[in-house]
Amino acid sequence: MISEIQTITTLPYTFRSFPHIRKIQVDFNNLFIFGKLKEDFVKFKRIIQNSEPSLIIGIALSKTRSSYFEPTTINQFNQTKRVENHPNKSYKLNFPINSNNFKLSKTPTDSFCNWTMYKIADFIHSRKYNILQYFVHIKEKDIKYLKEMILKPSA
């Protein structure tokens, strides 16, 4: 795990269940791995505060035919629960422009991926940080393109 006072530009994270952690760590040696969501979120917030990244990117496995970015995170978890008890229904996420191998999701998810990204987006919004936020569901074959993908201009 990365040091909480390390200066970084990109802060990537994934989940302990992600099967390709080692492949992601080739390009991102500062990869944060969520295991216990609530406990690790407290640690992740400290890293954001201490390192002030310019980009946070969440990485999860794509279970569809292609890799795709999420353009929105919603205040919903498991169809019926809210992530946070306030009226903000969603936050827009960023994504690279002209991402050839990657698509844009048409509908937001409401799984642990969304829970984590919503919590992060809500924290960034409440602190008025100027941080780009990406979330990608990725196929193993596309991992090699991820680092160059995040260097592209964003929407």
Image (cartoon, rainbow, N blue to C red):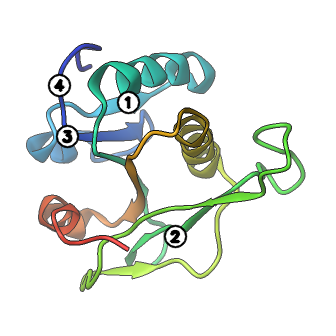
Q: Which residue is mark 1?
A: 33
As drawn, 141 above or below 61 = below
Horizontal side of residue 20 vs 83, given as left or right: left
**Mark 1 vs mark 2, CA separation in Å:** 22 Å
Nearer to me, 76 or 55? 55
Residue beneath label 2, please? 71
Real-space Cα distance between discs 3 and 4? 7 Å
Which is in the foreground here, disc 1 or disc 4? 4
Whole-angstrom CA distance, mark 2 to mark 4, is: 27 Å
Give the label, 1 or 2, closer to the camera: 2
Disc 3 vs disc 2: which is toward the camera? Answer: 3
Q: Return the disc, 3 or 1, that comes first in the chain's sequence.
A: 3
Q: Mark 1 touching mark 4, by CB under 8 A?
A: no
Q: What is the crowding at mark 2: few (fewer than 14 residues within 10 Å), some, or many (at least 20)?
A: many
- Between 53 and 103, the one lying in front of the other is 53
In percent of width and height, residue 115 lies at: 64, 44
- Work out whether residue 65 can be spotted: no
Residue 136's x, y, as percent? 40, 61
Report how far apart the C-alphas of labels 3 and 1 lie in the structure.
Answer: 17 Å
Q: Which residue is mark 3?
A: 9
Q: Say what amino acid the circle numbered 4 marks.
A: Thr
Name the spot of residue 134 as percent of width and height, x first: 40, 57
Task: Identify residue for label 4.
Answer: 7
